[in-house]
Image: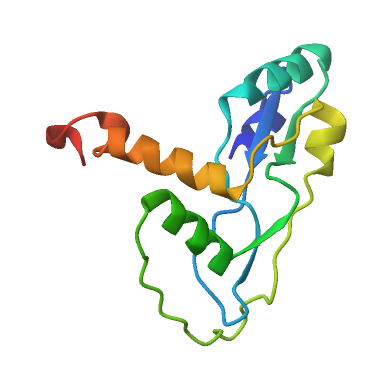
Amino acid sequence: MLRDYQHANPEWRTILLRYFNPIGAHESGDIGEDPKGVPNNLLPYIQQKLFATPDIGCVAYNLGTGRGTTVLEMVSAFEKAYVQKIPVKMCPRRPGDSEQVYASTAKAEEELGWRAKYGIEEMCRDQWNWAKKNPYGYCGNAENKD
């Protein structure tokens, strides 16, 4: 949608940020890249790129550590953050599921000069700390939880 809007309005400059969000486990446990969310320290890099490149149009960048993370590594990192065991049920691969999925972060590094500073354990710890402080998410209270 943003690509179409930018195409119809060429004066707009748009940067799309992509990161991998795992949705299931496989027997091998492979899911691909670290699904760390978009860090706050990325904004200056994006602004610099947008203002320095007036004809940027609409461009996408993959974000992450550049290192694959298995589902089992992710579970282990969350167990450390939560300080409790997480129940896991291993299921067979579904038809059409990929063995491994990776996304290159080289473009974000080369064009924005941005690299992830932290790994999966820090991401899980920070997510758990945020969730404990914000049990109803961004809306802030039980009345607005929908």
Q: Nearer the viewer, residue 84 or 90?
A: 84
Which quadrant is home to the C terminus? top left
Q: In percent of the image, x 52 and y 87: which residue is there?
A: 92
Q: Quadrant of residue 140?
A: top left
Q: How is the image coloured?
A: rainbow
User: Relative to 8, is 85 on the left or the right?
Assistant: left
Q: Nearer the viewer, residue 115 or 23?
A: 115
Where in the figure is residue 8, as x and y percent of width and height?
67, 29
Where in the figure is residue 81, as x and y percent of width and height?
43, 49
Which quadrant is home to the N terminus? top right
Where in the figure is residue 56, as x and y percent of width and height?
80, 24
Q: As displayed, is residue 137 above or below residue 50?
A: below
Where in the figure is residue 73, as x and y percent of width and height?
57, 63
Q: How many marks?
A: 0
Q: Nearer the viewer, residue 1 or 19?
A: 19
Q: Which residue is situated farthest in the left direction here?
A: 143
Q: In percent of the image, x 55 and y 54: which residue is there?
A: 21
Q: In percent of the image, x 55 and y 40: which residue is there?
A: 37
User: Relative to 139, is 91 on the left or the right?
Assistant: right
Q: As displayed, is residue 37 above or below residue 81?
A: above
Q: In percent of the image, x 75 and y 49: which residue is there?
A: 66
User: Relative to 125, is 11 on the left or the right?
Assistant: right
Q: Is residue 12 visible?
A: no
Q: Which residue is situated farthest in the right direction here?
A: 110
Q: Is residue 33 visible?
A: yes
Q: As displayed, is residue 31 above or below residue 82?
A: below
